[in-house]
Image (cartoon, helix red, strand yellow):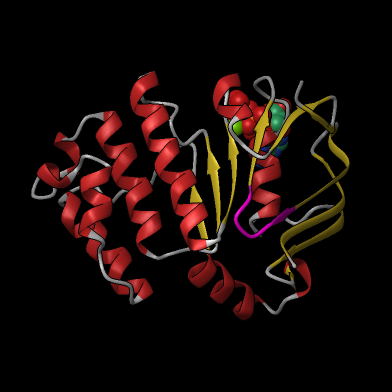
Amino acid sequence: MPSLIAENLNFSYDSPILENVTLSLNAGETLSIMGVSGSGKSTLLHILSGFLKPQSGIVKLLDKDVYQLPQEELLVLRRDEIGIIFQSHYLFLGFSAEENLEVASLLSGQKIDQELLSLFGILEVLPLNIGSLSGGQQQRLSIARILTKKPKIIFADEPTGNLDRETAFNVMQLLFDYVKFTQSSLVFVTHDPILAHKALHAYRLEHTSLKPLK
Ligand SMILES: Nc1ncnc2c1ncn2[C@@H]1O[C@H](COP(=O)(O)OP(=O)(O)OP(=O)(O)O)[C@@H](O)[C@H]1O
Ligand SMILES: [Mg+2]
């Protein structure tokens, strides 16, 4: 059973952004999206993750028709099963790194995974206030925070955009490992063709359509 199905998505602001976009993703699989700035990558992620209703088309997450679900069920689905790493990450400023993780842990009822934090190289910054972390440390923390809730589907919008290439590759590898071991799914946006090609399904969003990446 695919964990994500999108069929014939259409979405416009003033002009068309997406026309008849169709994709599907199974458990344990990864999908990358490239495309120039303004091509609609973030818009597509927002639609796939249940935040933005398309003008037409269907999105199914874990066999649930997202835009037909009662609001309450959609909230529960998003809270329990879906992990979203946005382009700008939302850490709670004024709190420590550890407190930010504790919030995620409380909300999801899942324990903080010390091994994960060690793999992300952020164990030593746990006591520090968010404001004193580097951009890259904040980004790794925000990804670790998302994984703390053990999502079944992860949507990531340029998750490694602030990181140097080596750290970016390491962090993406951790995400890929997570997907493999937990048989979850990952959809990510990237500007790096090498990272894009590491995904099982690699696409470019261009002129309102998804095309296989060459
Ligand atoms: N709320 C909005 N209202 C009107 N137009 C919008 C809105 N959000 C985005 N757009 C427009 O839709 C288009 C696609 O935006 P989107 O953010 O999806 O692009 P993107 O591919 O993610 O770009 P980037 O690589 O810069 O993040 C852009 O032309 C943008 O200006
Ligand atoms: Mg974007």
Residue 191 counted in the magenta span = no
- Asked whether 14 or 35 is in front, the reply is 35
Quadrant containing the N terminus in the rendered view? bottom right
> What residue do we see at 33% from left, 72% from top?
110
Residue 26 counted in the magenta span = yes
> What residue do we see at 75% from left, 57% from top?
53
- Asked whether 25 or 90 is in front, the reply is 25
> Is residue 79 shown above or below 122?
below
Residue 118 x/y as whole percent? 20, 47
Q: What span is colored magenta in the figure?
A: 25-29
Residue 27 x/y as whole percent? 64, 60
Residue 146 x/y as whole percent? 40, 55
- Residue 120 relative to residue 54: left or right: left
Residue 113 x/y as whole percent? 26, 61
Q: Quadrant of residue 136?
A: top left
> What residue do we see at 54% from left, 27% from top?
195
Q: Quadrant of residue 38?
A: top right
- Asked whether 199 or 18 is in front, the reply is 199
Specify the quarter for ligand 1. top right
Quadrant containing the C terminus in the rendered view? top right
User: Magenta: predominant secondary structure element?
Assistant: loop
> What residue do we see at 73% from left, 76% from top?
69
